[in-house]
Image (cartoon, coloured by chain):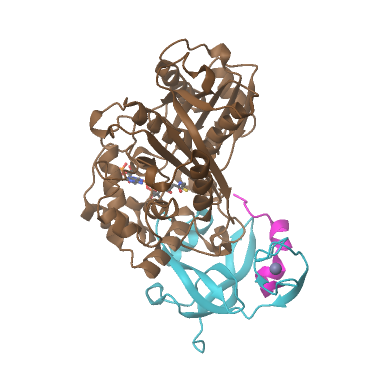
């Protein structure tokens, strides 16, 4: 049931492991995940690499229940039950989607401070895929 | 440019049909279309066909437009499969309209077909989800229910939209669908039942979601100049618009607006010389209940953030001042992906001509309607305006 092949995954490791963003040289806005042309000005493809802090706030979230998980996450659902997924507004500006971790689904709230952590996402083709998930940021405000 | 009319429209039954594949479903819709043409229908005049389709039940991914066309007796013509996820059918209609407008062809078929129930539920979810953003949204563990839930939750947070408002969409559409002999779920549901259904992706539950459906639909689109040879009451396509958007929701500037819907409808209104106020009936893309609420706002039927109030006040009921989804919508009629857009136009064709099968669902005396078809979570959107 391969749908993100290993080579395809490897190409995106800097964004997934280090959250490497792009600062637009023209308008200064930060793009993440990466774009060919800056999504804020649509006028430049010249970027500086920018290491994101991984910190942000929950912009919106969902609790994925039975019937709502893609097949490759069915095992996780079976083992751990319903899991939260959030769109997080990062401190540097861009929003990004990610699973929440180390949190009771009931405790996820709009606006809550979170920070990215490198976690196992799932296993496909026998290869563990790592990427970021968001955990509550107890020092954040 | 040439003016464009629709002179025939057909739809298969929507539902679960183990005995039918894409060819048989498409043929059912085609025959229904042929019999709806009042006079002089001649298949030999059909010069091209645009067929909306996403997955073909997993068995004929390449060249399927040629297959379904020859099966219904239309070999040796210009055929194209149109794929824009759930908006494939809406874009097939627009492609046919552009074809006729350009003067390239006079008589064109626009249709769509999907076979969704041949594969297991797990496999369906596998290929349904891949019309969203596969690199991030999918890898966060979401399918479309989860994506629309993210939008719904934010809408509730920003505007105070209530859980009840979502369920009101389902109740209204099931009420209309109960009167549609071609709908998948021909039964009414109660508000309490809709609110208490099992959670699929909180805040959305089973009754907030469309189902998986087999079905097909077909329209006969032609140059307005020849339309009267086929019927005394052609339906004209007076405006259309399409727009793409950032595929992943997180890339969009505004989480609670489908920018594609806004832009597509603005194009369509402008072309038709109309505004949202002039629309007397709309078939909108309610793949999840929140999607219908977004449509009210982004098509301009009410202000941003006010959709909850708009449904609560009853405007969009069949006897309201802005009826929406008289067919039962995707929610109750079913959502056979590639067929959905042309299926909406099938309903509008009959509504405008006063030929809806069960009179109870007929909105009376209307002349201007709008059909709205969304691909995935809004990555593609088409809007067409149909007039009597
Ligand atoms: C909502 C969904 C997750 C339910 O799937 P599921 O949990 O596998 O449920 P099942 O198909 O087993 O159906 C369970 C029961 O509910 C009924 N049902 C299923 N979907 C329904 C719906 N949307 N409305 C009303 N009843 C529904 C079924 O008929 C079935 O009843 P039965 O047990 O009496 O036969 C699935 O239909 C789905 O993924 N829908 C969305 C499709 C989609 O994403 N389309 C593209 C949109 S952009
Ligand atoms: Zn820029």
Q: Residue furthest front?
A: B273
Looking at the rendering, in which quadrant would you find the C terminus of chain B? top left
Q: Is residue B338 visible?
A: no
Return the x and y of residue A21 as percentages of the image width and height.
Answer: 69, 72
For the residue pair B292 and A98, the one nearer the viewer reads as B292
The residue located at (58%, 63%) in the rendering is B251
Return the x and y of residue B7 as percentages of the image width and height.
Answer: 46, 21
| Residue B209 falls left or right of residue B73 | left
- Rendered view: B218 above or below B57: above
For the residue pair B149 and A117, the one nearer the viewer reads as B149
- Rendered view: B68 above or below B214: above
| Residue B46 falls left or right of residue A75 | right
Image quadrant of ligand 2?
Answer: bottom right
Q: In the picture, residue B99 is in which quadrant? A: top right
Return the x and y of residue B18 as percentages of the image width and height.
Answer: 42, 29
For the residue pair B388 and B44, the one nearer the viewer reads as B388
Residues rendered magenta in the picture: A1-22
Q: Is residue B166 visible?
A: yes
- Rendered view: B234 above or below A36: above
Rendered colour, chain A = cyan
A15 part of magenta stretch: yes
Q: Which chain is brown?
A: B
Count the marks.
Answer: 0
Return the x and y of residue B309 as percentages of the image width and height.
Answer: 29, 59
Q: Residue furthest bottom?
A: A139
Looking at the rendering, in which quadrant would you find the N terminus of chain B? top right
- Rendered view: A105 above or below B238: below
Q: Residue furthest right?
A: A46
| Residue B222 falls left or right of residue B358 | right
The residue located at (49%, 48%) in the rendering is B125
């Amino acid at each position: 049931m391969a749908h993100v092949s290993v080579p395809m995954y490897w190409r995106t490791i800097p964004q997934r492991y280090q959250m490497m963003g792009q600062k637009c040289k023209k308008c200064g806005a930060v793009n993440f995940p990466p774009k060919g042309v800056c999504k804020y000005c649509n006028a430049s493809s010249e970027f500086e690499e920018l290491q994101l802090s991984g910190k942000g706030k929950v912009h919106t979230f969902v609790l994925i229940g039975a019937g709502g998980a893609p097949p490759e996450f069915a095992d996780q659902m079976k083992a751990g039950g319903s899991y939260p997924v959030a769109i997080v507004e990062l401190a540097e500006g861009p929003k990004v989607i990610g699973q929440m971790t180390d949190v009771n689904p009931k405790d996820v709230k709009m606006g809550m401070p979170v920070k990215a952590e490198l976690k196992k996402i799932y296993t496909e083709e026998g290869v563990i895929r790592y990427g970021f998930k968001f955990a509550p940021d107890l020092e954040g405000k | 440019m040439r003016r464009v009319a629709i002179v025939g429209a057909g739809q298969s039954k929507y539902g679960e049909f183990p005995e039918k594949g894409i060819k048989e479903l498409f043929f059912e819709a085609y025959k229904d279309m042929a019999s709806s043409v009042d006079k002089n229908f001649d298949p030999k005049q059909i010069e091209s066909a645009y067929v909306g389709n996403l997955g073909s039940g997993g068995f004929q991914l390449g060249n399927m437009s040629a297959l379904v066309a020859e099966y219904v007796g239309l070999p040796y013509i210009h055929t194209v499969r149109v794929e824009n996820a759930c908006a494939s059918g809406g874009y097939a209609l627009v492609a046919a309209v552009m074809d006729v407008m350009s003067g390239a062809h006079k008589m064109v078929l626009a249709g769509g077909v999907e076979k969704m129930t041949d594969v297991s539920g797990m496999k369906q979810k596998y290929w349904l989800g891949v019309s969203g953003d596969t690199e991030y949204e999918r890898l966060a563990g979401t399918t479309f229910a989860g994506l629309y839930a993210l939008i719904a939750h934010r809408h509730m947070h920003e505007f105070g939209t209530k859980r009840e408002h979502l369920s009101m969409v389902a109740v209204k559409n099931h009420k209309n669908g109960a009167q549609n002999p071609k709908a998948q779920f021909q039964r009414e549901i109660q508000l309490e039942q809709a609110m208490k259904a099992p959670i699929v992706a909180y805040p959305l539950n089973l009754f907030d979601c469309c189902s998986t459906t087999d079905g097909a639909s077909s329209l006969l689109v032609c140059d307005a100049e020849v339309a009267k040879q086929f019927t005394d009451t052609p339906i004209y396509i007076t405006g259309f618009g399409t727009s793409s958007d950032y595929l992943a929701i997180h890339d969009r500037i505004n989480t609670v607006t489908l920018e594609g819907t806004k832009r597509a409808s603005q194009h369509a209104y402008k072309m038709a010389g109309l505004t949202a106020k002039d629309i007397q009936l709309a078939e909108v893309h309610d793949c999840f209940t929140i999607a219908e609420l977004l449509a009210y706002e982004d098509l301009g039927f009410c202000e941003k953030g006010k959709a909850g109030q708009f449904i609560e006040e009853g405007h969009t009921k069949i006897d309201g001042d802005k009826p929406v989804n008289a067919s039962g919508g995707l929610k109750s009629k079913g959502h056979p992906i590639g067929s959905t857009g042309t299926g909406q136009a099938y309903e509008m064709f009959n509504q405008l001509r006063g030929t809806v099968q069960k009179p109870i669902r007929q909105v009376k005396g209307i002349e201007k309607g709008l059909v709205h078809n969304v691909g995935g979570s809004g990555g593609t959107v088409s809007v067409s305006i149909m007039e009597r």
